[in-house]
Image (spheres, rainbow, N blue to C red):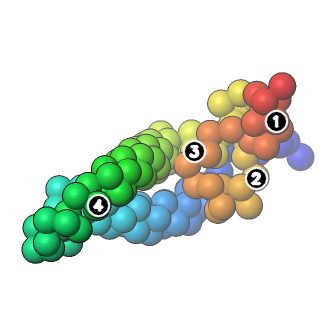
């Protein structure tokens, strides 16, 4: 029996459902991070006394930098999920871009935007 070269349409639909669920959660998290950065959540120091405001400015700057990093990482994750949806449409989803072999279902369920098999990922580190 020949080795499978791509996932079936039914399998791709299963992965699409997983990706859409993760995409919805990721987008919600990203929107919360953006709201936090823009002050839209109303949780700032405008209503505290000047003494506390001075003390909080340094911590606030660090917090905004960390939130910005988290937002950037979340956006990258969202873009990876969207790219995975495109690969599903093209019927190339789940194919390792290095080896050309199918990425195991277990890996795709855990990391649905993966483009490398574990084997290729390990070779990349060497």
Q: CA distance from mark 3 to mark 4?
A: 50 Å
Q: Earlier in the sequence, mark 3 or mark 2?
A: 3
Residue 16's x, y, as percent?
48, 60
**CA neighbours of label 3 inside 10 A, class few (<14), some (14 to 19), many (20+):** many
Residue found 40% across the figure and 62% down from its top: 26
Image check: 2 left or right of 78? Answer: right
Image check: 52 left or right of 46? Answer: right
Image check: 105 left or right of 36? Answer: right
**Contact check, label 3 and label 2, Cβ < 8 Å:** no
Work out whether residue 104 or residue 10 is closer to the camera in this orientation and state it: 104
Residue 98's x, y, as percent?
71, 27
Q: CA distance from mark 3 to mark 2?
A: 11 Å
Q: Which mark lies nearer to you, 1 or 4?
A: 4
**CA neighbours of label 2 inside 10 A, class few (<14), some (14 to 19), many (20+):** few
Q: CA distance from mark 2 to mark 1?
A: 15 Å
Q: Which mark lies nearer to you, 3 or 1?
A: 1
Q: Which residue is mark 3?
A: 93
| Helix, strand or loop for disc 3 | loop
Residue 19's x, y, as percent?
48, 60
Please say if 61 is above or below 97. below
Q: Earlier in the sequence, mark 3 or mark 1?
A: 3
Q: Earlier in the sequence, mark 2 or mark 4?
A: 4
Residue 104's x, y, as percent?
76, 52
Q: Which residue is mark 2?
A: 104
Q: CA distance from mark 1 to mark 4?
A: 46 Å
Seen as rendered, the residue at the extreme right is: 1
| Helix, strand or loop for disc 1 | helix
Q: Which residue is mark 1?
A: 122
**CA neighbours of label 1 inside 10 A, class few (<14), some (14 to 19), many (20+):** few
């Amino acid at each position: 029996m020949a080795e499978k070269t791509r996932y079936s349409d039914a399998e791709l639909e299963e992965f699409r459902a997983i990706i859409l669920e993760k995409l919805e959660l990721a987008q919600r998290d990203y929107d919360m991070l953006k709201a936090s950065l823009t002050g839209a959540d109303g949780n700032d120091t405008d209503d505290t006394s000047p003494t506390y405001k001075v003390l909080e400015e340094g911590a606030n700057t660090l917090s905004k930098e960390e939130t910005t990093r988290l937002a950037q990482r979340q956006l990258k994750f969202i873009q990876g999920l969207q790219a995975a949806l495109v690969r599903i449409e093209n019927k190339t989803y789940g194919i390792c871009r290095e080896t050309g072999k199918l990425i195991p279902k277990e890996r795709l369920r855990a990391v649905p935007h993966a483009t490398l098999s574990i084997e290729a990922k390990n070779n990349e580190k060497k």
